[in-house]
Image (cartoon, helix red, strand yellow):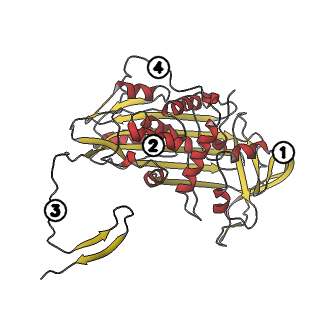
Amino acid sequence: MKRALPLLLTLSLLAGCAAGTGGLSPIPHPEGSLPPVGVEVCASEGLGEAYDDYALKLLRACRQEGQNTLLSPLSISLALGMTANGAAGGTRREFETLFGMSVDTLNSLSARFMEDYAALGGSTRATLANSLWADPDITLTDDFVLRCADPYGAQLYHGDLQDPATVNQVNQWVSDATQGLIPSVVEEFDRDTVLALVNGIYLKNAFLHPFAAPTSEWQMDFTAEDGTVSRPLGMRNGTRNEAYIAAEEGQGVLLPYDDGRLGLLLMLPREGLSLTDYLARWDGATIPALLAACQDTRVSLTMPKFKTEWSASLSTPLATLGLARAFDGQAADFSAMGTLKDPEDNLCIGDVIHKATFEVNEMGTEAAAVTAVIMNKATSMPADQPISLTLDRPFVYAIVDRLTGTPLFLGTLERCG
């Protein structure tokens, strides 16, 4: 039984084919094949719930109260899923904790995404592409490259990442993958960057039952939680049967697309309940429960037409959610990914960049997202190198409880003699 991923109805941007790359030619994948990775995606109870839980936690971690937020959990999970294939030890366990499943199972889930969303029907236009961009300073293992090629379909490219021409190639790849909605992902790579793992997604869907075409443009009132009123263009569906959702904490509707698989879920908290408090009550089981509660009901729906864009570094939110070791130049373990020219250097995530855009009008929605995991080399300090410490300027001193860390005495020495 295939299980449609519910959160994709609201937050994710889906797709299914590779993008162009301009002048660079892809490096052929290593010969060979992988052993089976993970279990059949739907054979494990709670797998979809674990994925939804990851997505909601990420949304809450990225959201700034009162500000628009837009993520593609799918784009992020595909980019991080490829990255996780190069992780080992405690670093790999952090990826598994973040997603609530093993890396092999995440690979299987990604394969299902790639398969299912490449086969969407109706008028849906979808692209989904993954790529690896490797600097000469890193030698990737064949096993890692294979695990990115299958099931992610990632193409491998080699080039000097500090060369502006290579940066242009990466950005052209991103633009192609998102149909030009996101023209670039980086302005330049850090001098320590040795690998970029990039996902690009584009999705354009038409509603099964479009809104009525307006005879003229009109504006509606939209009131923010701080009382600010704006006047966006509005749209109405008239009064007709919709998949209506009545829940204790709010109400909403599911608007199906004409591909027979996806839909746009819209949920409004009840009066007096802030969006922050509303989202705090959601977990991995919430959206499946909302979808199960849909009832065919006469609904008069009014909503704003809008276009929104969002971009940010995900480093801090991901570290907050437990993926801290991967960003630590000394503690990260990506030994399964490859080796660096200088054996004293260590491989870690330097940044995770995410950009997304979404637009809705009477006919449907258009959305795109890109996620780039930037892998950097970090200079490791040899274990036998002594540290020089000279207390020849003001310093802090304390008498502390070694068991509890409680300071019994705490002071500064700022003047002697």
Find residue 181 and report its horizontal and vertical position in percent.
52, 46
Residue occupying image coordinates x 58% and y 55%? 308
| Sequence order check, earlier mark of 3 and 2 | 2
Q: Which residue is mark 4?
A: 35
Q: Are marks 1 and 3 in contact (CB under 8 Å)?
A: no
Q: Are marks 3 and 2 in contact (CB under 8 Å)?
A: no
Q: Quick one: SS at disc 3?
A: loop
Above or below residue 90? Residue 32 is: above
Find residue 332 and report its horizontal and vertical position in percent.
35, 43
Amino acid found under the numbered disc labelled 2: Glu
Q: Are marks 2 and 4 in contact (CB under 8 Å)?
A: no
Rounded to the nearest angstrom, the CA distance separating label 2 from label 4 is 23 Å
| Sequence order check, earlier mark of 2 and 4 | 4
In the visual, does 190 lie left or right of 99?
Answer: left
| Mark 1 vs mark 3: in front | 3
User: What mark, if any, has residue 389 been given in the picture?
Assistant: 3
| Mark 2 vs mark 1: in front | 2
Q: Which residue is mark 2?
A: 94
| Mark 3 vs mark 4: in front | 3
Q: Which residue is mark 1?
A: 295
Q: Does residue 154 appear anywhere in the picture?
A: yes
In the visual, does 400 lie left or right of 45?
Answer: left
Amino acid found under the numbered disc labelled 1: Gln
Rounded to the nearest angstrom, the CA distance separating label 4 from label 1 is 44 Å
Find residue 137 and report its horizontal and vertical position in percent.
25, 36
Residue occupying image coordinates x 72% and y 39%? 257
Rounded to the nearest angstrom, the CA distance separating label 1 from label 3 is 70 Å
Above or below residue 135? Residue 212 is: below
The 10 Å Cα crowd at callout 1, few under 14, some 14 to 19, many 20 or more, is some
